[in-house]
Amino acid sequence: MKTKTANRACAACAFWNNLEEDAGECRRHAPQTVAFEVDEEVKFESMFPVTAGDDWCGDFEKKD
């Protein structure tokens, strides 16, 4: 990973909610609805995208 993106990683972002060792939720935007099938029935769930701490994107804002 390049140094520039390492400094802008999800783990250092104000919108990232750490869930476990190196995974967390991106809370930059509202949760997204996901549809999935369980026992021939379609279920819906709202969830935030899960990212690794060293992922990055263009919406980065540094934690205070």
Image (spheres, helix red, strand yellow):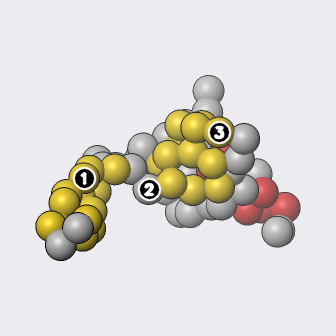
Residue designated by label 3: 20
Distance from label 1 to label 3 (Cα)?
21 Å
Q: Residue at x 73, y 62 (%)?
A: 5
Mark 1 residue crowding within 10 angstroms, few (<14) / some (14–19) / many (20+): few
Tag 1 and tag 2, C-beta contact below 8 Å? no
Can residue 55 be seen from the camera position used here? yes
- Say what secondary structure mark 1 lies in: strand
Distance from label 3 to label 2 (Cα)?
14 Å
Q: Is 10 placed left or right of 30 in the picture?
A: right
> Residue 45: which numbered mark, if any?
1
Residue designated by label 2: 49
Q: Amino acid at mark 2?
A: Pro
Residue 35 in percent (x, y) is at 23, 66
Instruction: State which mark lies toward you, 1 or 2.
Output: 1
Could you say which is closer to the camera, residue 6 or residue 46? 46
Q: Amino acid at mark 1?
A: Glu
> Residue 27: which numbered mark, if any?
none
- Say what secondary structure mark 2 lies in: loop
Mark 2 residue crowding within 10 angstroms, few (<14) / some (14–19) / many (20+): some
Instruction: State which mark lies toward you, 3 or 2.
Output: 3
Distance from label 1 to label 2 (Cα)?
12 Å
Q: Residue at x 67, y 44 (%)?
A: 11
Tag 3 and tag 2, C-beta contact below 8 Å? no
- Say what secondary structure mark 3 lies in: strand
Q: Amino acid at mark 3?
A: Glu
Of the image marks 1 and 3, the number of the one nearer the N terminus? 3
Residue 56 in percent (x, y) is at 62, 60
Residue 55 in percent (x, y) is at 65, 60
Can residue 61 be seen from the camera position used here? no
